């Protein structure tokens, strides 16, 4: 099941980072963790992940800022961003839709949904 | 014949003097009245004379004083445009046109006279400019008619009759005097019989004296009547002056009230020219009244949003867009939000004659609204985070993804911890909303100080251990008790102790003390954590308040804990105190009344 796809999980809640990490590692993904947007942004630049899973409400740099900043990077090297968010307003939905390769999953999420998203994107890429 | 002529001349000279006197008296009276009235009216700011309502005051005034000889009242603005013009309809057409313009160039209080065309009536005009901030902003002109004193007025005829009577009496007296004077001459030639006759004429003289006394009495009575009439007129005059004073006072009062209001008020006429603006609004716009009043609304307001909003309201079709809008003046009042609303000024026939624009500062309301919105967002996040953990951990266990027994155990533990976190969060929320609504019930019971102490310790020990924070405990030898709601007090103290653990870095140190002082039990929590910034200190017990310090924001929190704690302590008759220095640590102290003291108080 080992593959070389890199997934970066950014969340301020340790439990959530841990459970996503476990689930994805079991499917053979390489998983890296970050506590906040600032850490996440640095890792995106150095690690060049295939998928980024990020929370919205985070200290230091929130998920929104992170998405805005990385949208430009995606033009050079595309990757999937999964935004995990508590609530989604119509304006936020519009905002996510105009970003490249970005989907959102509402909290509380099912790990299966996240895995499906990641699998789909990485599988499509492989084809 | 000569005598009659002399009498007639005498009467006419006397009457003439009387008429002259009366005329002089009237002129002086009108001079006094005119000067007073014109000065009184000119005291008002010129904008007072715009619009129907204010004219009502002048109308009343004119009606009141028209009997006193006021024939017209003109008020012009500085360009000569008439604002108010009341003219007695008898003289309206007779005022020479050059007079209409003549007084516009006076500088101070002036008084001049002119004759009405085609009439002998002399008009005394009093004019005074209206000054505003040292500048002439208009003219008030009052015209008084000094009615010619008619020779044949009933009053005068009576006076003349009296005068004739008096003169006649005088002649009779004189005649009698002459007769007396020539008596010695007669005596020389006359006999004793004549002397007899003279003695009888003395008695006649005595009768004549009685007639004079009657005339004098009659004259005196007339004088008293005249005096009474004069007094009555004077009283009426005083009454009128008082009324004028009251009206002027009330007007000033209303203007003062409008100026001291915490709302901006603008009144426009039907053409959307500004008639009135109050001090609050002038302050917002940073303009003077002169720059605004009498100008079209869209010239005075350099604000497209508000202009189009106000101009679109026509008062006929009421559903013409929203009745109020939020506006901002970024240059004049940065960070402030105002709400402008329009209502319509109507006359007695209910037709629209202008607009009243009310501008209110709603910055505070907007910020409360925003705070509530942020609070709901943060609460949603706070509630969903443990739920997400519980759901995903549970999913892992259900899907048999964890073969390792130890890992399974860790997952079950985490689910249990997160459930507790969720429970305490919901409880906190419930308590705070109950306190807000004023229906939190305190279940009072006897609490042993050390139980409370140990329960609170137990609640935070786990987290402290993970961060390798040492908690030093200090308890008295005999444990005092207190009366209160154990669950609430526990929540209050755990909030403080939990904050100490939360904001103290790894390997830090916390001191948790229970001491006694007089009638109080004191719980103290001292930490060497990040401390509280000076700017945050006054707000830490405010609901939903969270510091913007990154060391605080990187921790989860709803901004409810300390608000709840202080409310609980207050409800128990206690006090909470905090001392803190940034980067050095914080010291919280909760003083609660002891059992004995509490019972003593009941």
Image: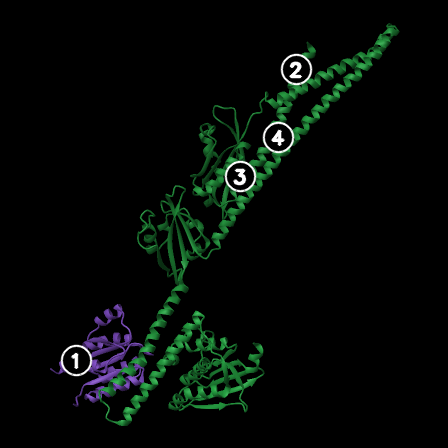
Residue assigned mark 4: B25
Residue assigned mark 2: B8
- Which chain is home to disc 1? A
Q: Are marks 3 and 1 in contact (CB under 8 Å)?
A: no
Give a yes or no on whether discs 2 and 4 share a subunit: yes
Q: Which of the two residues, B228 or B82, is positioned nearer the viewer here?
A: B228
User: Which chain shows up in purple?
Assistant: A
Position of residue B205 measured from the top left corner of the image (x, y, whole percent): 79, 15
- Residue neighbourhood size for the residue with mark 1, other residues' Cα within 10 Å, grouped as few (<14), some (14–19), many (≥20): some
Position of residue B195 measured from the top left corner of the image (x, y, whole percent): 86, 9
Which residue lies at the image location 68% right of the left edge and 15% below the top edge?
B7
Question: The residue tagged with tag 1: helix, strand or loop?
Answer: helix
Position of residue B448 measured from the top left corner of the image (x, y, whole percent): 50, 86
Position of residue B360 measured from the top left corner of the image (x, y, whole percent): 41, 58
Could you tell me if residue A31 is visible in this image?
A: no
Give a yes or no on whether discs 2 and 3 share a subunit: yes
Q: How far, Cα to Cα, is label 2 from label 4?
A: 25 Å
Residue assigned mark 1: A121
Q: How far, Cα to Cα, is label 2 from label 1?
A: 133 Å
Residue assigned mark 3: B38
User: Which chain shows up in green?
Assistant: B
Mark closer to the chain start, 4 or 3: 4
Q: How far, Cα to Cα, is label 2 from label 3?
A: 44 Å
- Residue neighbourhood size for the residue with mark 2, other residues' Cα within 10 Å, grouped as few (<14), some (14–19), many (≥20): few
């Amino acid at each position: 099941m080992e593959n070389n796809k890199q997934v970066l999980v950014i969340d301020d809640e340790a439990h959530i980072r841990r459970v996503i990490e476990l689930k994805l590692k079991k499917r053979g993904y390489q998983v890296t963790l970050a506590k906040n947007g600032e850490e996440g942004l640095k890792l995106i630049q150095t690690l060049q992940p295939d998928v980024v899973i990020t929370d919205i409400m985070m200290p230091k740099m929130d998920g929104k800022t992170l998405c805005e900043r990385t949208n430009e990077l995606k033009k050079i090297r595309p990757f999937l961003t999964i935004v995990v968010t508590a609530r989604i307003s119509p304006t936020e939905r519009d905002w996510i839709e105009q970003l490249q390769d970005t989907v959102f999953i509402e909290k509380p999420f099912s790990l299966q949904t996240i895995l499906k998203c990641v699998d789909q994107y990485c599988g499509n890429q492989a084809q | 014949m000569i005598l009659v002529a002399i009498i007639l001349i005498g009467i006419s000279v006397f009457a003439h003097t009387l008429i002259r006197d009366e005329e002089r008296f009237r002129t002086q009276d009108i001079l006094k009245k005119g000067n007073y009235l014109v000065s009184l009216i000119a005291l008002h700011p010129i904008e007072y004379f715009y619009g129907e309502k204010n004219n009502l005051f002048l109308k009343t005034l004119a009606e009141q004083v028209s009997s006193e000889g006021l024939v017209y009242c003109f008020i012009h603005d500085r360009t000569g445009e008439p604002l108010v013009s009341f003219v007695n309809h008898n003289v309206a057409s007779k005022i020479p046109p050059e007079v209409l313009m003549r007084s516009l160039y006076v500088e101070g209080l002036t008084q001049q006279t002119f004759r009405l065309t085609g009439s002998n009536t002399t008009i005394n005009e009093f004019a005074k400019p209206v000054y505003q901030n040292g500048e002439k902003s208009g003219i008030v002109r009052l015209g008084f008619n000094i009615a010619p004193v008619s020779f044949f007025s009933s009053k005068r005829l009576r006076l003349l009759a009296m005068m004739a009577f008096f003169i006649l009496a005088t002649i009779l007296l004189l005649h009698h005097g002459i007769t007396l004077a020539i008596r010695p001459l007669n005596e020389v030639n006359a006999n004793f019989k004549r002397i007899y006759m003279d003695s009888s004429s003395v008695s006649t003289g005595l009768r004549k004296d009685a007639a004079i006394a009657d005339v004098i009495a009659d004259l005196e009575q007339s004088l008293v009547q005249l005096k009474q009439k004069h007094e009555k007129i004077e009283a009426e005059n005083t009454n009128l002056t008082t009324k004028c004073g009251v009206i002027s006072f009330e007007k000033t009062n209303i203007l003062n009230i409008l100026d001291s209001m915490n709302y901006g008020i603008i009144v426009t006429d039907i053409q959307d020219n500004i008639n009135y603006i109050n001090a609050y609004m002038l302050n917002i716009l940073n303009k003077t009244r002169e720059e605004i009043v009498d100008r079209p609304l869209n010239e005075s307001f350099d604000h497209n949003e508000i202009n189009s909003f106000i101009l679109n309201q026509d008062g006929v079709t009421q559903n013409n867009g929203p009745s109020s809008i939020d506006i901002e003046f970024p240059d004049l009042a940065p960070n402030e939000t105002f709400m402008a609303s329009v209502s319509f000024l109507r006359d007695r026939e209910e037709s629209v004659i202008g607009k009243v624009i009310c501008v209110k500062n709603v910055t505070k309301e907007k910020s409360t609204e925003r705070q509530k919105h942020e609070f709901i967002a943060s609460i949603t996040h706070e509630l969903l985070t443990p739920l997400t953990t519980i759901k995903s951990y549970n999913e892992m266990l259900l899907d048999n993804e964890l073969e390792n027994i130890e890992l399974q155990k860790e997952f079950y533990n985490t689910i249990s911890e997160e459930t507790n976190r969720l429970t305490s969060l919901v409880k906190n929320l419930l308590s705070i909303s109950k306190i807000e609504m004023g229906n939190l019930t305190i279940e009072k019971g006897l609490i042993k100080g050390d139980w409370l102490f140990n329960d609170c310790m137990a609640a935070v020990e786990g987290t402290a251990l993970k961060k390798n924070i040492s908690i030093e405990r200090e308890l008295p030898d005999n444990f005092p008790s207190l009366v209160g709601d154990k669950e609430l007090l526990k929540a209050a103290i755990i909030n403080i102790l939990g904050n100490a653990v939360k904001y103290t870095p790894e390997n830090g140190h916390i001191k948790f003390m229970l001491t006694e002082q007089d009638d109080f039990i004191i719980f103290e929590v001292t930490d060497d954590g990040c401390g509280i910034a000076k700017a945050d200190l006054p707000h830490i017990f405010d609901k939903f308040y969270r510091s913007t310090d990154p060391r605080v924001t990187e921790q989860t929190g709803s901004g409810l804990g300390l608000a709840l704690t202080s409310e609980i302590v207050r409800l128990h008759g206690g006090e909470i105190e905090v001392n803190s220095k940034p980067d050095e640590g914080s010291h919280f102290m909760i003083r609660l009344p002891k059992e004995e003291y509490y019972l003593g108080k009941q």
